[in-house]
Image: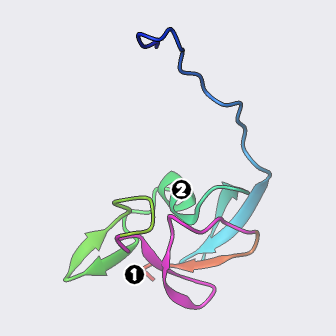
């Protein structure tokens, strides 16, 4: 894609981090170092991160302003999953637990 200036949009070279595992609601989940908790949960098919007012919640803004992706990580409640990178051995609890 180019604009009137003749510049072309390009992708930065990318790759995935090392494969690691986290525990989500008591189950082992494979993911990659460097990705966010939200990305790992979505890739694993987690159907909801939390419930508010009885309604299931998933990431909405993906930039940390809305708290819709709040989960408990290593015992810390209401952690914004879209802002935190996964680490090997991390424990994540959603409202499904």
| Residue 67 against residue 1 in the figure, above or below | below
Pick the front one: 67 or 45: 67
> Which x, y percent locates residue 38?
51, 62
Pick the front one: 45 or 16: 16
Q: What's the residue at 57%, 77% (across, down)?
A: 92
Q: What's the residue at 43%, 77% (across, down)?
A: 70
- Per the rendered image, the range of residues in magenta is 66-87
Q: Earlier in the sequence, mark 1 or mark 2?
A: 2
Q: Mark 2 points at which residue?
A: 39
83 magenta-colored = yes
> Which x, y percent locates residue 29?
63, 63
Q: Is mark 1 on a helix, strand or loop?
A: loop
> Which x, y percent locates residue 95?
39, 81
97 magenta-colored = no
**Label 1 Cα crowd, 10 Å radius (few <14 / some 14-19 / many 20+):** some
**Tag of residue 95:** 1
Task: Classify residue 45 as left or right of residue 86.
Answer: left
Q: What's the residue at 69%, 76% (across, down)?
A: 90
Furthest toward the right, the residue is 18
Q: What's the residue at 42%, 13% (across, down)?
A: 3
| Residue 82 against residue 75 in the figure, above or below | above
Q: How far apart are marks 1 and 2 (CA)?
A: 17 Å
């Amino acid at each position: 894609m180019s604009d009137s200036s003749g510049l072309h949009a390009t992708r930065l070279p990318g790759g995935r981090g090392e494969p690691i595992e986290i525990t989500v609601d008591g189950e082992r989940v494979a993911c990659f170092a460097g990705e966010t908790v939200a990305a790992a949960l979505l890739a694993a098919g987690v159907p909801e991160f939390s419930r508010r007012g009885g309604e299931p919640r998933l990431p909405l803004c993906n930039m940390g302003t809305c708290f819709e992706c709040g989960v408990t990580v290593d015992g810390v409640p209401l952690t914004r999953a879209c802002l935190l990178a996964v680490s090997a051995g991390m424990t994540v609890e959603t409202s499904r637990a």
